[in-house]
């Protein structure tokens, strides 16, 4: 087998895997599997349509499934697993890491779960049942128990002796946790510090006593943010009695952040439902439809309010039809700036840069941004009206200056209010214990469309009359 780092940097690895999977040849797939990293296989599977993926899974040997199981979607592993003999099922289940095994078991129907759990060895079964006690989106639900621990009071020689027995089971050995008899963390020591110290050196002299921890019931996103914020290789997870029960590794944190960012992005775009593990091409048309249609229907009917506003100002629009030229621009400017403000605030909140206690600072900052953007936009449009708008489009009863005044003031007011609304809604949602992403772009766009019509026609009525 080629070295992993060499296989990773080849740009055509994914295409190579896809070609092998499409060929349907077990020999070809096996040969490619020896050349590439399982991560390339994961990307390749995401790009297969459902029919091809089902065909590939049906022919996938159990030894390859065991090798790739940690990288494939749990639903795909379960589908293939259900067709294998019990002996091969046991082989695949034993190959899974603790956290991936729990993900697979949680993906299964509850009535199917016991028949797979009974295939596990006693220690793995106990670990799986312990991990399944925690909800899937908590730190406890995402942690792994495959960590390196040593007892306090040991010398370097004794510590290395303990680690010798763990080297095959620990997912990460570069960070080693020093614990007492109650499994409470006393510190952390690096493997290199043990390797380059004399054998009689006490571990307590080498360990760092300042160690971040997170409770098992805390949200997985908070755990991932701590890994990123404090540049951790592994974040210890503790129970209610502050005993070490697992770790969130840096690769788990990357996966969590990707999942959370995808979820927030979909909510901002008005896409509902659970994202799940299925890639875009693997998600059915009906699932896409079901997740998108709800918001589209609601917002479509909310947009009717804009029509009623225009009907209420029908006399103004009829008398001064030139207003129709600039109405879409005024409304769109509000939607764009409101969406920008909401996105910036939601992102800052997701990264932990903002707290609800800073509500006033957010509003003050966005108010100034809104005034600046609205004013500059108004100046540009006023220049266009003064010098480029054909005079035949302006009623005899109006002056070019009057039209420019209405459009310019409307733009300033619309951009200012839309920016404030875009900033206030996510913070308000957070205060109300709602997901800020849910009230973002689609809802804001519809809301500021209505406000834009009211602002525009109200100012026109005031100036022209």
Image (cartoon, grey):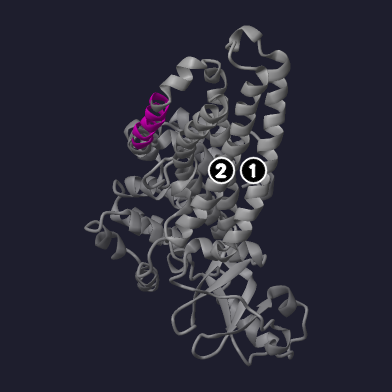
- Residue 195 lies within the magenta run: no
Image location of residue 360, percent across then percent down = 60, 60
Question: Which residue is more in the foreground, 336 or 197?
Answer: 336
Q: Based on the displayed image, in which of its 4 quarters is residue 168 positioned?
A: bottom right
Q: Earlier in the sequence, mark 1 or mark 2?
A: 1
In the picture of the structure, the residue carrying the numbered disc 1 is: 370
Q: Residue at x 52, y 19 (%)?
A: 324
Residue 11 higher or lower than 317, as above or below: below
In the picture of the structure, the residue carrying the numbered disc 2 is: 417
The answer to whether residue 436 is visible is yes
Determine whether label 1 and label 2 are within 8 Å by CB: yes
Question: Which residue is more in the foreground, 284 or 307?
Answer: 307
Q: Residue at x 39, y 37 (%)?
A: 283
The answer to whether residue 35 is visible is no
- Disc 1 on helix, strand or loop? helix
Residue 428 higher or lower than 396, as above or below: below
- Disc 2 on helix, strand or loop? helix
Question: In the drawing, what numbered circle is on residue 404?
Answer: none
Decide if residue 374 is on the left or right side of residue 62.
right
Question: Which residue is more in the foreground, 38 or 309?
Answer: 309
- First to last magenta residue range: 298-311
How far apart are the two marked residues, 1 and 2, measured between alpha carbons? 8 Å
Q: Residue at x 60, y 12 (%)?
A: 394
Image location of residue 445, percent across then percent down = 48, 37
Residue farthest along the top direction in this orientation: 392
Image location of residue 369, percent across then percent down = 67, 45
Decide if residue 310 is on the left or right side of residue 297.
right
């Amino acid at each position: 087998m080629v070295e992993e780092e060499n296989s990773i940097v080849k740009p055509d690895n994914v295409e190579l895997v896809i070609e092998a999977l499409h060929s349907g040849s077990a020999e070809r797939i096996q040969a490619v599997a020896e050349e590439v990293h399982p991560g390339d296989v994961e990307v390749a599977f995401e790009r297969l349509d459902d029919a091809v993926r089902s065909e590939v899974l049906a022919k996938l040997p159990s030894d390859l499934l065991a090798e790739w199981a940690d990288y494939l979607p749990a639903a795909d592993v379960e589908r293939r697993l259900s067709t294998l003999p019990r002996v091969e099922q046991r082989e695949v289940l034993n190959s899974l890491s603790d956290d991936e095994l729990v993900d697979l078991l949680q993906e299964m129907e509850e009535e199917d779960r016991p028949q797979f759990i009974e295939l596990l060895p006693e220690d793995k079964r106990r670990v799986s049942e312990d991990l399944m006690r925690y909800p899937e989106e908590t730190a406890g639900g995402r942690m792994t128990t495959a960590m390196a621990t040593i007892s306090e009071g040991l010398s370097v020689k004794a510590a290395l002796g303990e680690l010798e027995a763990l080297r095959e089971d620990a997912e990460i050995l570069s960070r080693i946790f020093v614990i007492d008899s109650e499994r409470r963390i006393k510190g952390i020591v690096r493997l290199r510090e043990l390797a380059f110290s004399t054998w009689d050196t006490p571990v307590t002299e080498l360990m760092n006593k300042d160690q971040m921890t997170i409770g098992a019931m805390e949200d997985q996103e908070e755990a991932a943010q701590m890994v990123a914020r404090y540049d951790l290789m592994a974040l210890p997870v503790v129970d209610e009695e502050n005993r070490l029960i697992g770790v969130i590794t840096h690769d788990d944190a990357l996966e969590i952040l990707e999942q959370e960012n995808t979820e927030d992005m979909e909510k901002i775009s008005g896409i509902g439902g659970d994202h799940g593990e299925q890639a875009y091409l693997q998600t059915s048309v009906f699932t896409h439809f079901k997740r998108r249609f709800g918001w589209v229907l609601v917002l479509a009917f909310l947009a009717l309010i804009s029509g009623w506003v225009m009907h209420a100002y029908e006399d103004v629009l009829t008398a001064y039809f030139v207003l129709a030229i600039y109405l879409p621009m005024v409304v769109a400017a509000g939607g764009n700036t409101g969406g920008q403000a909401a996105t910036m605030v939601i992102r800052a909140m997701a990264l932990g840069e903002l707290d609800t206690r800073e509500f006033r600072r957010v509003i003050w900052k966005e108010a100034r941004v809104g005034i600046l953007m609205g004013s500059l936009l108004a100046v540009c449009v006023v220049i266009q009206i003064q010098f480029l708008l054909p005079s035949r489009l302006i009623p005899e009863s109006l002056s070019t200056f009057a039209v420019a005044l209405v459009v310019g003031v409307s733009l300033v007011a619309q951009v200012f209010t839309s920016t404030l609304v875009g900033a206030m809604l996510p913070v308000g949602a957070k205060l109300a214990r709602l997901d800020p992403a849910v009230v973002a772009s689609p809802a804001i766009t519809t809301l500021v469309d209505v406000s834009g019509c009211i602002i525009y026609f109200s100012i026109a009525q005031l100036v022209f009359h």
